Amino acid sequence: MKIEVTCNPYFYVSKQSRLIFMALLLASFPLSARDKTGPYFNDPEELVRHLYEQVTFPAGQTPDWDHVRTLIIKESTVVMRVAKGETATLSLEGWIQDFVNFIEEADVKTTGFEEKIVTLKSMVFGDIAHLLVLYTSYIPGKSRAPREGVDSFHLIRKDGQWQIVSILNEIPTPDRPTPETLH
């Protein structure tokens, strides 16, 4: 089968017109389609939900830490509960390394890991946001029940894009129950 294609000789598009068309076409794409540093989030809740999805992984896989880095400003601070009366203050890289150490020491690469949002409360004011999250974390195949935790996120919108500035973590105990606002 032979297909013949002919062009209309009266239809001519100049090089300049083609360049203008391409520029307009590219400008019409959302920033996320152009941004090679990471996804674009115009909603802080969407960003935080995405972070939880990124640190949840099936057996045989681990998080894409380069992708996670695009969600959080490099100067961020993460404060985590590490013992009943002790917290650790970490940089973004320190938090990632702490997570990597957990994956290796608890051997969760073979089991996978789940961290799911139970309740999320947010407050957005201009270009700042505060999100309070009640979550459960769970290692599939382990006899231990899912563990609850509370994360407090601070975010900023820069150049129209939300990014995480800090994460504070607390673990509920009988002496320090989950705040009523998260029930």
Image: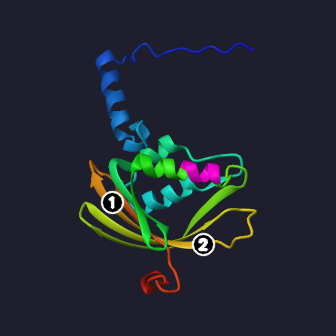
As drawn, is 61 to the left or to the right of 63?
right
Quadrant hosting residue 180 = bottom left
| Residue that mark 2 sits on | 147
Residue 7, image x, y percentages: 49, 15
The answer to whether residue 40 shows anywhere in this view is: no
Specify start and end residues of the magenta stretch as a single range. Answer: 100-105
Disc nearest the viewer among 2 and 1: 2
Q: Which mark is residue 141?
A: none
Helix, strand or loop at disc 2? Answer: strand
Q: CA distance from mark 2 to mark 1?
A: 25 Å
Q: Residue at x 58, y 54 (%)?
A: 102
| Residue that mark 1 sits on | 155
Q: Is residue 72 above or below residue 142?
A: above
Q: Is residue 141 magenta?
A: no
User: Label 1 amino acid?
Assistant: Leu
Q: Is residue 75 above or below residue 129?
A: above
Residue 34, image x, y percentages: 40, 37
Helix, strand or loop at disc 1? Answer: strand
Principal secondary structure, stretch drawn in magenta: helix
Q: Residue at x 57, y 66 (%)?
A: 116
The answer to whether residue 66 shows anywhere in this view is: yes
Q: Tell me how many marks there are.
A: 2
Mark with earlier residue (2, 1): 2
Q: Residue at x 48, y 82 (%)?
A: 178
User: Label 2 amino acid?
Assistant: Arg
Residue 87, image x, y percentages: 42, 65
